Amino acid sequence: MSAMDPTEIFRQEASELFEVLEGALLDLGQRPDDRELVDSAFRALHTIKGSGAMFGFDKVASFTHEFETAFDRVRKGEIKPTQELISVALAAKDYIRALIEDPQSTDDVIGEAILDDLKRFVSFDQPAAAVVEIAEAPPLAPGGSKQASWHLYLEFESHILRNGSNPLDLLEDLCKLGPCFVVPVTDGIPFLDEMEPEDCYLKWDVKLHAACDKDAIDDVFMFVQDELKLTLSPLEHVEAPAPAPLFQLLDEEPAPMAEMPAPPVELPAAPVAEQPVVKTEPKSRPEPKPEAKREERGIATVRVQAERLDELMDRVGELVIAQARLTQLAASGSDLSIKMIAEEIERLASSLRDTTMGARMVPIGSLFGRFRRLVHDLSRDLSKPVEFVTSGEDTELDKTMIECLADPLVHLIRNAIDHGIEDNATRAANGKTEQGRIELAAVHSGAQVLVTVKDNGGGLNTARIRAKAEEQGLIAAGAVLTDHEIHQFLFHPGFSTAQTISALSGRGVGMDVVKRTIENMRGSIDLSTRPGQGTTVTLRLPLTLAIIEGLLIRVGEGRYIIPLPAVEECVELTAEDERSRGRNFLNVRGNLVPFLRLREIMSSSGSPDKHQKTIIISTGETRVGLVADQIIGNHQTVIKSLSKLHSDVTIFSGATILGDGTAALILDVAQLVAMAQSKVEKQHISEAA
Amino acid sequence: MALNPTEPKWSLRLPADCSIAAIRNVYELIREAFGRQERLEIDCSSVDKADVTSIQLLLSTARTGEAQGRPVVLTSFSQSLRNTLRRAGFASEAMIDQHFPQKKDGT
């Protein structure tokens, strides 16, 4: 339980800011006129720069500063963000990320090249327009008369330095507007004992002699407007020769003490009362006490190491197991007060479990954001314009699942663009719009989350998949298979219908890995396609990997858990069904449902119970009955992984500890059904032979 | 960063990093030195990272010394510290003298 390294905190914060920055840049490509997006990108850049400098990432700070400066013309609205500019800006973002995460991998030459590109784009594009714009907008005082000088009084919130903002950078930016006389106000500096060294106590009184309007000044402080009390009033035009501005002094080699210029002559201030004073308060809400503000900030979010959440979840798992033992013990006795305590603890443990699981839930939108860049880059590389639409970003999923989902989704989206979306000529020939469309959506469905990747491309070529399967000897020529069954070959290791191997696909490595990854998360993957209209891949995922609701059953002497989301209903195996031995089909309200006798699969000894029970489960589109001796009931199942020794036993996805301390295996129903199907197929083949 | 045993006892050399990332340590050190020394001389020659917090700490130190009647003298401002002072608006020697009690040329 050690405190986090501050630089690690910065890395994490920067990682979030990169997502914001990338999202804003990509959105700008779609909505170049959206000022909010430009501001959002700049806020992220500014914070990265400030925090970078604060935590000693000097290269990050200086590169980001250059990036900011080059992109400044976009912020000022002088040029529009073109696709080329966005691409270079994204490369600049990647470079900053590399500087933070893996500085060894970076090279100054690359950084300079990116900055050169950035400067080329921002200076090449529409330079004349900018000049005209400036010429057309002469600086006017609020009263309408020409105004060339301003008086500013800057009072920052005390915590501003902790946020990574640097008032000195802002003063420097202000000086770029024109000759500027900055006088620090030191009245607020406390004695040592009363001082918080990271707080800001200095204030500044500034006289700016620049032909600029109020907006230009506001722009300088736009990122700290919530943390700054800015009093702004116009000064009367001063004819006195302007002394050397501060920023020029800064650019020069520092002069020896004796050669330092004299203190700036106080310029006569305008009769402030006659001019309107513009006051920018840090939002017009009542000023809370410093303690209250600190408390408010602390409560809003708390950054917790992921390992701690894992640890907490493990502890809750142990608690749930202990509680199950207590409940069982209480039920076997007659002490009413023990029973009451057991019930209370069960209620508390259940509530604690839900809260802990809730703390691990992360909106899937944090994952979706990453793919926008992927689509942008692939779309550019393959010259296939693609619109990327996401929905259900607020859908929450266990953080471990989110991490595991990233690679499979990358693969599915790559496939959708590379194989799914047709080239421009084919789309045009088929009467489709030039721009393809990829939809990535997430939605809750009971105890599962459905994640879908849908494209409006050409759909799967079933005939080609079949031909390839026959060529590889996976099926006999002419075998009768449904389209759905044929599509399942795409998940076969080494299966690829791509005729050429590209950097993106064609090696047949991928869909099998995707399927395995999803199944390892106790999820399933499903494909549906319509020729000429596109393909939809649906991932069904459990909400969490840690604790699930299960149905506890007994087969012979062994006890097993069936994940409750897979269970549709439970029925008794009738004498008639029993007599159907050899056919293994149940009649459920007129529908024939195949069933598996778990006693046979588990090789249980002893004679079966007289009244056998059937649990109807569904896996994708398949319904199957599992015949057990007894259904014990619902069980809060804390999942424990099986050891490597059991890794080849695919029909179990894990184990759990029951209230009496014994273990129960968790059935992997999809694997169980697949195993039974393969057994039946082999039987058919041998019978045919 | 510590009291320098080879120099007069009342000399304290500031570390290279006096930016916000390290300012609390510097603050603690100055307070500790303040508690021990009758007269405090702070050598600023090694400072190569400074920001608003460094300036504020030196101002507060000077102000506290003055209020307690215990002289605080700042010596050998590094170039980096000077640049930061100028960026903050302490643009002239006169201004710096006014706010920071300096010892020059061995005086």
Image (spheres, coloured by chain):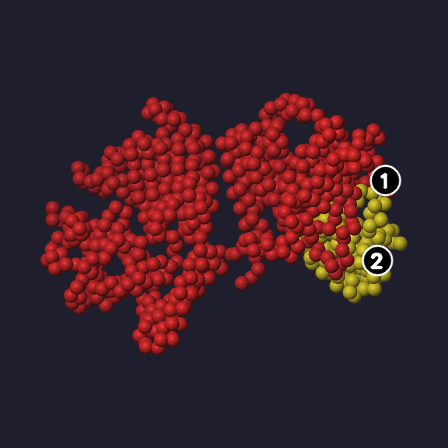
Chain colours: A red, B yellow
> Closest to the observer: A560 or B6?
A560
Q: Which disc number belongs to residue A563?
A: none
Q: Position of residue A650 (x, y in %)?
A: 29, 55
Q: Position of residue B53 (x, y in %)?
A: 72, 51
- Give the foreground label among 1 and 2: 2
Q: Kindly indicate the quadrant of the structure image that contains residue A112.
A: top right
Q: Position of residue A22 (x, y in %)?
A: 52, 39
Q: Residue at x 27, y 56 (%)?
A: A651
Chain to which mark 1 belongs: A
Does the rendering let one see residue A453? yes
Left or right of A484, for residue A352? right
For the residues labelled 1 and 2, the Cα–Cα distance comes to 26 Å
Vertical order, A682 against B38 (above or below): above
Q: Amino acid at mark 1?
A: Ala
Left or right of A687, for residue B97? right
Discs 1 and 2 lie in a common subunit: no
Say what secondary structure mark 2 lies in. Answer: helix
Vertical order, A424 against A448 (above or below): above
Q: Residue at x 78, y 47 (%)?
A: A185
Q: Which disc number belongs to residue B66?
A: 2
Mark 2 Cα-neighbour bin, 10 Å: few <14, some 14–19, many ≥20: few
Q: Amino acid at mark 2?
A: Glu
Q: Residue at x 47, y 38 (%)?
A: A373
Q: Residue at x 89, y 54 (%)?
A: B107
Q: Kindly indicate the quadrant of the structure image that contains residue A578.
A: bottom left
Chain to which mark 2 belongs: B
Mark 1 Cα-neighbour bin, 10 Å: few <14, some 14–19, many ≥20: few
Does the rendering let one see residue A382? no
Q: Position of residue A487 (x, y in %)?
A: 27, 40
Q: Which residue is mark 1?
A: A262
> Closest to the observer: A502 or A292?
A292
